[in-house]
Image: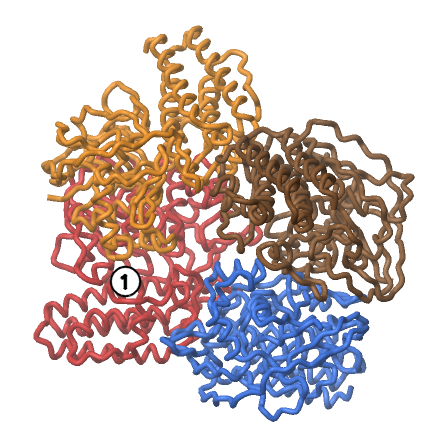
Chain colours: A red, B orange, C brown, D blue
């Protein structure tokens, strides 16, 4: 890879993280609203720690850490690197101050740039930097979803950015696109970057199936709510039913009913629920129950990837998922850039999957239990991060990501 | 099906449950040691409730419940049938007394026999009774594992049956049996009984793999323990590592170290740990960590079923898993009758899976989340219950079943 | 003390425990319904352990424990005696069987009788035996309240003894008995037995006050319920209000409303709520809230004891609290034999309080935190156990004892 | 009261709160480290809410709330005023920003000043303002203890104020001051301000006792630690022993042992443990266990107040408790200005205690359960806030206040 191009890309991605924090105060960047979410300041520091730990420490001459204490404070989950600060306590770190973390970013950015200018070991370093940039983009998506959750806990319903959410026009009716049975190949194949969990490309046998042309809308999901979907056990997996009842859930995470109006908390503040935009912030259990109620099911990840293989439209980042436009030409709309799509597939290793040696091998493999694969991307996914082979994963109860529903049927 | 044969089989299976309770006192049959386990008395009543609810209520003229309150007390998890007594409170039911439950069993048995003698709707009834008998056999296995857990909580270490456990002879070295890549068929096909989760028979593509010739022994697992396996995070899935540390686990469920001796609690009381018998009472996380430590992995359920397809030896029930005998002729030993074998496969529906209509449809499908499939059978599985297509399933942390390890490798 | 009289009393009290278990099956005697309660079998064994540990072990020649394992299994909370079986697991002990525990009782009873016949150290032994009998009587009360709780968890509402509860006649109106200010003496003074927490007798200054002539009735408490008492925060202590809301409490422990009827679970099964009998099974928080609602308060223990000093009627045991009879002559009715009366006084040591040396010193003193003193006695208190200086104590949320309300006022 | 003097005092106390926040960043002021503690920003807002709600709303013409949402956000626990924001979520309020809260303070301060200038209802208003100022001083102490706890959770151990803690000189030996038995009066009597829980002044009978001349030092407490005090059950109340074991406690809250050195986290950062300063940050259970170990006991609140009645030295605020100076002349040193002193007395109403009508009556009375009274004051208590009749109170496990030990003995 050309060093100049890589450096330019490095500066662009690193700058994007900083820009995501710009609408926020120091206080906004410090607080953690739940153990699953992290403070913005922590994201800014941890992504920097990643470059310091996996690039500079290995390749910089006379490496000295910017601040020894940061090695522990901003380690997320890499046991191989040593101790970690407890995840639920990330929001207690008022020091280092946000300004100190931004200084940490500048320092590491300069040292990475110097390393790129100097080194003779370009290829290995370039691969690690590429990895670090994709890692940072994952955290950029989390910055938006974590801050959304934090703001949603405030009765003032503050907006991340104040702006009106335009009402979407009517969307085309859902239709089904069919695929034949057979051995298909899934997994990453081309020369571009991918995470280890997308490898190796391999064969799977898929029965004939059809997949829905677009995501389920808020309006459609509201019918499920109003039909008593959350009160009918036969629609739910047993574990999902227990979860719904224990938590007395009756609607998606950010919906709220004020008198007879339905509103939705968004990064642009509290807004009237838009019937035409896709429903998001659903757990796997809700997506699965809706699918059953509608007479369909969720797709497997092989079905999804097989269907998405020819898609070329990867979407554009936005603060809220866009509705499909009525004249859209794609056979399958909203594969990318709207909401992650829960699949029926538990997150497990592909046949022949290998983790990397050392701490970097903890990136993906050790999370392959009791999680479900989500496919596509969301409105919060940065440009250049999505691809058809991408495997996102969350526990069945996670709702704070932009997670929605694409339906499937066996034929 | 011939009614006489069915009735004979009905009497045999129903009698087996009663005989399992014979070594136990009324007190032993009443107590519940954890929410996952049920009292013996509850098992005896619930299996009876199953016949009363799904056969008698539907087909008996002028049906009257034996005791209306039992309809709620002994419903396990069927929302479609109405209310249920809370699972963790099953052990509080000192009434009905064990004698009353045995009277309930006799009453329902007589009415089932009368129904079989009378009816013109033989086929549908026969299918339901067949289903009820397989259901009862599942509970027979649980009776043994649940009572084992209850007895293990008693510092007196009482035996279910007092008897010496003979020391096993040395076992043959583990070797690997290889299978070629290709599309294989799995799922139930023949005319015999199966549960709905074994259907439909369908195709899967399987890469070339090898599977171990026998289960991992206590002696082999002890090496893992003594090598610090429970203290090395890189061997564990992230969730498993948290679970091990939170619960300060260092060995299989029923092992205990007394000074330098290793003992194991069994249904025959506390016994010296037998190095040659297969290790059991392991969670998925432990089985997976051991596999990683040994340089192998767990098999998928397709790999397991494909390998087991030609096996004819289904094992014999015993109170403790037998060692493989040195001269044993099978290529793959201990597929059945020793310990259930954890697979890498999450429990999910086969392509085209359909649940039955009504409450009986709650039997399997609604549990298809966050559980792993186990294959084979254990020493506690009743005769006539095991088959190669059988899909058992438990959460990744379950340890009170006879669960062990068969290894696999990608080729 | 005359040895013959003591032995007769020993046999009487020990026999009473056994007789309390007679209406119960082995199963009834084994189960534990919550950590605060213990199985009947455990009570039968622990009271025996008390004599074995504190009398036989110290005074019997060539002492051998009946069963070494019982030393741990039936130790309640005496750290000084060694290890204890965990309290919440008392209900898992199906072995030793009830029959074995009864044999343990017979064995210890015989050895105590032999010791009493033989010994020259009569006085010290007699004092310990006296202590053990009062200890056993405390457990007799717990046997009734614990088994009541256990039976109440059974949807069949089985009775401890099947019998009709006669409707009580109308009770006299509540009136107030006044006492002048001054220094009063409280604490045990006469030659009879008392627990260490009743000592030393000492002076307290008491302001002028009045105390209610009888306990609050079910009918009176129902008015509080129907007036919305459980929904009005200003009536409750802050901690009590949180507790009521967290547990969604709306009535006393054993009351239940079936359509418009109010019923109460009793040791005689489910019965129509009797408006004239005293309300019991209330927490301190409920008693305190009722008192505030009624414009009164609870008495302090000094006020209570000062008022009760001249009472001679100690009540008779019964399965349910009796109503006051209309013609009753006592100024203050229902001091004893109905329901324990919550006081405003936290359980703390009297000035100059001393614990005994050794494990027996753990009897009372170490529980003097975060509990409230209750005075009087209940219908479940054995004959000969109550006295005006007796200090019972429970946490503010305890409801499974026969606990009721006597009111007081500052003058 | 003279209005000018009151206004001056109002400005002084209000300014003190603001000044306490000056060493802190916006982030420091926003975060909540545990449910018991509140963010600095919340304290600044809640104390302002108190004046707005209890003074302005009642007495200001055409009252308009500064921000309607603040009525809920900054209500601490007054059910009578309406809804409250959940206490554990106070740290999630990144909005209003710190600057907005300071503007809220300025606005309310101006309106209070205007009200004081205008009004004809001077006396009632003056009483409420006086109450509000004492309320604010209570929160000033909490600001220091809450921020100390928050900073202690940060592995960087940041200081509230960077400064060296001077080593204290040797302290005089502890001696005992004796008091005779008799009826004493306690409770507030003079014309100055007091809280309702200090009333009415009343009589108590006190047996002869002695009280220690100073607080227990770090050095003395370290002997208890090194003697195995935390491992010896006979020294602890039963509930305290369970708490120590469940939380694996081995030393006071902010002590830490680094190799063989003992350090203590302070508002001035991590410092060498000073053997001569008083030990603080102890729970009631630790204070009680230490007292038992040392052969003494804690005083009752009547004993303490009787002993302190003639003390005139109320101490000066400091960031850390001072040692007693060797030449100090007071008979009883360190009654005020060092550490709050746990008493044996549960927090309960004085005889004849009355709460005020309305929401203001929720100030004290509703917390009178399961808490212990502490007497004196601490180094964090503002000037002019302490007095001998003051009743502070916390649960037996609270450790984040400056809480220490004064000993007593029965004579």
Asked if residue B201 lies left or right of residue C170, the reply is left
B337 w.r.t. B345: above or below = above
* Front residue (pair A367, C388): C388
Which quarter of the picture shows residue B199? top left
Tell me if residue B352 can be seen: no
* Front residue (pair C107, C134): C107
Residue that extends furthest to the left in the rendered view of this protein? A120
At mark 1, the secondary structure is: helix
Which quarter of the picture shows residue B263? top left
**Residue A104 locus on image (x, y percent):** 30, 78
Mark 1 closeness class: few <14, some 14–19, many ≥20 residues within 10 Å: some
* Front residue (pair B70, A292): B70
* Front residue (pair D101, C306): C306
- Which residue is drawn at the image coordinates 84% and 54% (left, top)? C309
**Residue D279 locus on image (x, y percent):** 54, 78
Asked if residue D322 lies left or right of residue D366, the reply is left
Which quarter of the picture shows residue B338? top left
C79 w.r.t. B197: above or below = below
**Residue B9 locus on image (x, y percent):** 35, 14
Name the residue carrying label 1.
A79
- Which residue is drawn at the image coordinates 85% and 52% (left, top)? C212
Q: Chain of mark 1?
A: A
Asked if residue C303 lies left or right of residue C56, the reply is right
Which quadrant would the C terminus of chain C be assigned to in this image?
A: bottom right
D85 w.r.t. B140: above or below = below
């Amino acid at each position: 890879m050309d060093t100049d191009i890589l450096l330019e890309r490095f500066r662009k991605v690193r700058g994007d993280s900083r820009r995501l924090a710009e609408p926020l105060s120091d206080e906004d960047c410090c607080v953690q609203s739940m153990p699953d979410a992290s403070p913005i300041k922590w994201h800014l520091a941890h992504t920097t720690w990643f470059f310091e730990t996996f690039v500079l420490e290995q390749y910089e001459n006379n490496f000295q850490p910017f601040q020894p204490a940061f090695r522990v404070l901003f380690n997320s989950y890499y046991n191989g690197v040593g101790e970690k600060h407890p995840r639920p306590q990330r929001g207690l770190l008022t020091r280092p101050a946000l300004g100190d973390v931004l200084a940490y970013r500048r320092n590491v950015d300069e040292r990475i740039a110097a390393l790129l200018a100097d080194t003779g070991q370009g290829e290995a370093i370039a691969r690690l930097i590429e990895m670090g940039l994709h890692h940072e983009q994952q955290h950029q998506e989390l910055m938006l979803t974590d801050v959304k959750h934090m703001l949603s806990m405030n009765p003032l319903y503050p907006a991340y950015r104040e702006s009106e959410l335009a009402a979407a026009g009517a969307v085309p009716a859902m239709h089904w696109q069919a695929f034949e049975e057979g051995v298909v190949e899934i997994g990453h194949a081309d020369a571009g970057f991918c995470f280890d969990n997308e490898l190796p490309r391999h064969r799977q046998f898929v029965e004939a199936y059809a997949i829905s042309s677009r995501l389920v809308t808020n309006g459609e999901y509201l019918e499920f709510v109003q039909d008593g979907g959350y009160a009918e056990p036969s629609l739910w997996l047993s574990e999902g039913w227990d979860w719904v009842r224990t938590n007395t859930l009756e609607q998606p995470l950010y919906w709220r009913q004020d008198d007879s109006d339905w509103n939705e908390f968004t990064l642009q503040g509290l807004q009237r629920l838009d019937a035409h935009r896709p429903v998001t912030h659903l757990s796997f259990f809700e997506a699965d129950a809706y699918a059953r109620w509608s007479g369909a099911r969720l797709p497997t990840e092989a079905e999804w990837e097989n269907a998405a293989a020819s898609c070329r439209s990867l979407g554009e980042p936005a603060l809220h998922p866009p509705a499909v436009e009525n004249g859209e030409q794609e056979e399958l709309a909203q594969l990318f850039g709207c909401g992650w799509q829960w699949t029926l597939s538990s997150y497990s290793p592909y046949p022949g999957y290998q983790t990397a040696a050392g701490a970097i091998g903890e990136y993906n493999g050790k999370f392959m239990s009791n999680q479900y694969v989500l496919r596509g991307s969301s409105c919060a996914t940065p440009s250049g991060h999505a691809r058809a082979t991408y495997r996102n994963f969350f526990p069945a109860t996670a709702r704070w990501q932009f997670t929605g529903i694409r339906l499937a049927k066996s034929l």
